[in-house]
Image (cartoon, rainbow, N blue to C red):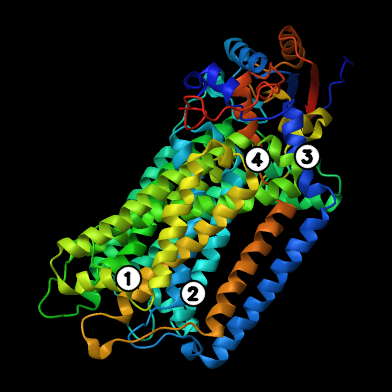
Amino acid sequence: MAHVETGPKLYGLIAEFETPEQLLEAARRTRDAGYRKFDCYTPFPIHGLTAAMGVREAKVPWTVFICGLLGAIGAFSLQVWTSLVDYPLNIGGRDLLSWPYFVPITFEGMVLAAAFGAFFGTHIYNRMLTYYHPVFNVPQFARASTDRFFVCIESKDPKFNRDEAYQFLQSLNPISIAEVPE
Amino acid sequence: MQQTIKQSEIRDFPLFEGQQSYERITGQITSIPMERHPVAWTIMFGLGFIGATSLVMALAWLLINGVGLWGINQPVGWGFDIINFVWWIGIGHAGTLISAILLLLRQAWRMSINRFAEAMTIFAVMCAGLFPLFHTGRPWVAYWLFPIPNWLAMWPQFRSPLEWDVWAVSTYFTVSVLFWYMGLIPDLAKMRDRAKSQLARVLNGVFSLGWRNSAIHWMRWEQAYLLLAGLSTPLVLSVHSIVSLDFAISIIPGWHVTIFPPYFVAGAIFSGFAMVLTLVIPFRIIYPKLSEYITMNHIDWMAKVMLATGWIVFYGYLCEMFFGWYSANQFEQFLVVNRFFGPYWAAYWALIICNGIIPQVLWSPKIRQNLLVLFIISIIVNIGMWFERFVIIVMSLHRDFQTSSWGMYTPTINDWWLFLSTIGFFVMMMFVFARFIPMLAVAELKELWYKLYHGHDGHGGTPTREPKPTAPAPQGGGQ
C-alpha cells in the first residue's frame, strides 16, 4: 500500500473491504472509535449497517405520513368545496355533502401525495443531483456499485487527524486505503 | 428475510442458476444494454415499431373522422374502447402485484422479475389510457376531467365512478413510474460505473441522479421503497375495484353485482401473470443470460399463481350464474341465458374454455416446466381475459330491459386497427426497455444472493440438483 501524500484539501480517508461482514465490523468499530462524520458505501442495502454506524432517522416515513395526510385532506376538501360552496348542484334534493362518494378520490389523493413525498423526500434528504462528489475521485470506488464495501472517514469530523485516521483504518484490515481529495 | 428462508428451501428451489458472484450478477445484467443487441431484438423492435407507427396513423384517422369510425352504437355505447381499456389495465396489475405485494409478503422470488413486470405495467397503462381518452371524442379537452379552474366555471363530477377512474388510473400510472424509477436509480449508477462509452456514462450518470451507494442513502431508499410498496398495494386493489365500479354502480343486468371489485382484481392478476409469462419466456430465449436469474422455479411459481387466480376468476363466473338465478329478477336471469345461448354465445364459451378449462393443465408439474406449452397457455389466457371483458360489456348492453332497444355490436376494421396497434406499441416499448435499461433489479438480486448464501457459497443453489416442483412446496422461496 503506497503511502499517500497529504494534500492541502482532503475530503477524507476511504478504506475498501471485501465482504459485508467486514464492513459491518468496520462501521461498528469506526463508531466506537469516536468518529461521527463517516459514511459507508455498499453495492446493495445491508441490513443493520446504519444501526452499526449509529445512524437512526425516520425523516422519510414522517414525510410520507404528512404528505399522505395532506393529500387526503386536500382531495376531500376539494370535493367538499366544489360541491358545497363553489358550484352546488341540487339534483332531486340529494345531499350535497355525499361524503361516501368522496372516499375513492380522497384515497387516491392520499396515495398520490404520499408517493410524491416518498420519492422526492428521499431525494431531497439524500441531496440527489449532486453529480460531483469527492468519493468519485478514488479509482477503486467504481467497484462500490459492484462488489466492494467502503468506509470513508470525513475530514470534517472534529476527531479527524489524517495520520491517526490512517492508522485506525489500517487496524481494520482493509484491502486498500486511499485519500479522497476534495 | 434472512431468518425466514429455510436452508432446505434454498437447496430444493434455487433462485439462481450456476456459479454466481456479486460481480457476475452485476455484469450479466448490466452488460445486456451495453453489448450489441441480438438479431431477434431488431426483428421484434421492428415489428413493434410498425405497430407503433400504425397506432399514430390510427389515432390520426380517428381524430380526423371521430369515433363514428368505431362500431359503438345505441345501445352498445361501450365497445372495444372500454374492453381494451380494462384488458390493458388488468395486464398492468401483475407488475404492481409482483413489485409491491410480493415484496410485503417477503417472497424472495419476486426479485428476478419485478423490474421487468413493472416496466410491463407502465407500458400497459399507457396503452390502456389511450382508449378512454379517445373515447371522450374530444381528447383535446380531456383536461376537463381534472379539477382545473376554467372559463366554464365547471368542476368534474366527483360522484361519478368515471371520474374516480381518472384519478385512480392517473395516480396508478404516476405511482408506478415513481416506484419503478426509485428501484432503477442504484442500477443506473451501476451502469454508469461500468459504461464503456462516454455517452452511456453521461446518460446513465444523469438519470442515476448522482447516486453514490452511500449507506445513509440506501437506508432512506429502503424506507421509501417499502413505503411505496405499502402504498401501491391498496392502490392496485383500488384501481381495478374502481374500474369495476364503472359497471357495478349502474343498474344494467350483469353489472349491478357486489362481487365485481374482487372478481375484477383477481382477473387482473390472472391476465397480468399470463402476460408476464408471455413476455418472460421469449425474453429468456433472446437473452440467455436472464435464465440464470429467472429460473424454471420462477416460471413454475408464476404458473401456479396463474392457476390459483384462474380459479378465483372461475368462481366469479359461477357466482354470476348464481346471482342471475338467485336474484329472482327476470332481466338478470335472461342475461345468463343470453350469455349461454344468445347471439354472442361463442364469446362466452370461448371465455369459459380459455380461462376456466385450458389453464387446468397447469396442475401438471411437467406442463409447468414446458416453456412452449406455458407460452401457448399464457396467450390463451390473455385471449380469454379479453373475451371476459367483451362478455361483460357487450352482452349486458346489447339486450337490457326493453326488447325495443335491443341491438347488436360489431367491431369495425378501425376498432381492430387501433387495438392491434396498441399491442405493437407495447411490444416496441418492451424492447426499448430491454435495450437501454437493466432488465432485472441488480441491487435487489445481489442483496438476495447475499442473504441466501452470505456471499460465501459461490453457488446459486446446487447446480447438480434438478428443481423438484412436486415436493411439498413453499409457494415462494421466502415464506
**Label 1 secondary element:** helix
**Label 2 secondary element:** helix
Please state if A122 lies on the left or on the right of B168 as rendered.
right
Q: Quadrant of residue B132?
A: bottom left
Q: From the viewer's perspective, is the residue at label 2 or at label 1 nearer?
A: 1
The chain identifier of the residue carrying mark 2 reads B
Q: Which of marks 2 and 3 precedes in the sequence?
A: 2
**Label 4 secondary element:** helix
Point out which mark residue B339 bears. Answer: 1
Location of residue B199 with respect to A4 vertically, above or below: below
- Counting from the top left corner in percent of width and height, residue B201 is at 80, 48
Amino acid type shown at disc 1: Arg
Amino acid type shown at disc 3: Asp
What crowding class fits label 2: few (fewer than 14 Cα within 10 Å), some (14-19), or many (20 or more)? many
Q: Quadrant of residue B248?
A: bottom left
Q: Which of marks 1 and 3 precedes in the sequence?
A: 3
Amino acid type shown at disc 2: Phe
Please state if B317 lies on the left or on the right of B349 as rendered.
left
Between residue B26 and residue B72, name the one nearer to us. B72
Point out which mark residue B193 bears. Answer: 3
Residue drawn where x is 64% and y is 22% of the image? A157
Location of residue B305 with respect to B350 vertically, above or below: above
The chain identifier of the residue carrying mark 1 reads B
